[in-house]
Amino acid sequence: MQITVVGSGTVVPSLERRQSCVVVRAGGQMIVFDLGSGAVRGMLRSGLDPLAVDRIFFTHFHPDHTVDAVPLLFAINYGASEKRARPLYVSGPEPFLRFWSSVMEVWGEWMADDYTTLVSQLPRECPSPIELEGCRLSWAPAEHRSESISYRLDAEGGAFVYTGDTGYSPSVVELARGADTLLIECSFPDEAPVAGHLTPSGVARIASEADVRRVVLTHIYPAAEELDLVSEVSRGFDGEVVVAEDGSEFEV
């Protein structure tokens, strides 16, 4: 699996960090998790073709994780040189169908006219993994909003987990168990925690309990940006710690 962190930022506007988006290439497919503001142009900046996306999965419905769905689907519909021949799969946590129908009520005339979009919603508790080309997808509840979930991809070379926004969550620990790479939010300093988000010590706790090999920190607010996050997380976690930048790439 080839992983690209397209957006590592938050709702706070930043020239250095776009809002949340990560792209995974596995089994010949391009899988996108979250589409915050700037994601479409960020894919281009990272050498990825946004019009080539095969599957989109959302962790929750906050705008900084969803708003670029509209320009992406609009571009697929009108900005491609050839009509899209294969379907686009779009999924998110329950009640995603209600959320998506509201988006389509406003923008649908321009978003899904000339190609097939297959939309589905995922229960917060994963009944069984979904087999994709070259990998297997599972998920678990996250502690952020009522619908929030985190995702895991298992492939021959190992496992990748993306938390989305979350506070400490036993279900996320279990989801990340033994993963090679954990892309995990690290929003605020330990001295100024915010409910539903992680601080460095919370990241270290999840990573240590899950026994992951490497953590990659994302969703970084300005106050956390000022910290030596590698040192902060390493106080409670013995594995590799990396601070994501927009365009960071990893292999699992």
Image (spheres, rainbow, N blue to C red):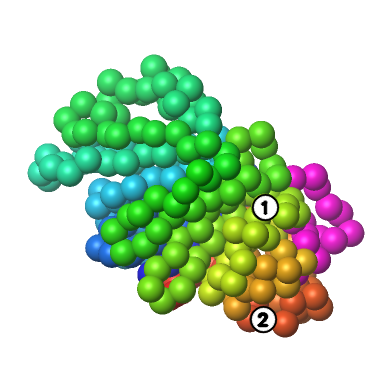
Judging depth in this view, the residue of 77 and 91 nearest the camera is 91
Q: Which residue is mark 1?
A: 171
Q: Tell me which residue sits at (27%, 34%) in the image.
A: 117
Place of residue 26 in the rendered image (x, y in percent of width and height, measured from the top left): 33, 64
Q: Nearer the viewer, mark 1 or mark 2?
A: 1
Task: Write down the residue under mark 2.
Answer: 239
Would residue 195 be found to the left or right of residue 40 on screen? right
Range of magenta residues: 188-204
Q: Residue at x 73, y 68 (%)?
A: 209
Q: Nearer the viewer, residue 35 or 96?
A: 96
Q: Quadrant of residue 103?
A: top left
Residue 192 falls inside the magenta stretch: yes
Camera sees residue 4: no
Q: Left of 189 or right of it: where is 142? A: left
Q: Residue at x 21, y 26 (%)?
A: 113
Amino acid type of the residue that numbered disc 1 sits on in the rendered structure: Ser
State left or right for residue 30 relative to residue 39. left
Q: Is residue 103 above or below residue 171?
A: above
Figure quadrant of the C terminus: bottom left
Q: Earlier in the sequence, mark 1 or mark 2?
A: 1
Q: Is residue 144 visible?
A: yes
Residue flagged by tag 2: what amino acid is it?
Answer: Gly
Are circles 1 and 2 on residues that touch, CB within 8 Å? Answer: no
Which quadrant holds the N terminus? bottom left
Is residue 87 rendered magenta in the image? no
Q: Position of residue 29 (x, y in %)?
A: 28, 58
User: Most extreme residue toward the left, as rendered?
Assistant: 82
Residue 124 to residue 3: above or below = above
Q: Quadrant of residue 45?
A: bottom left
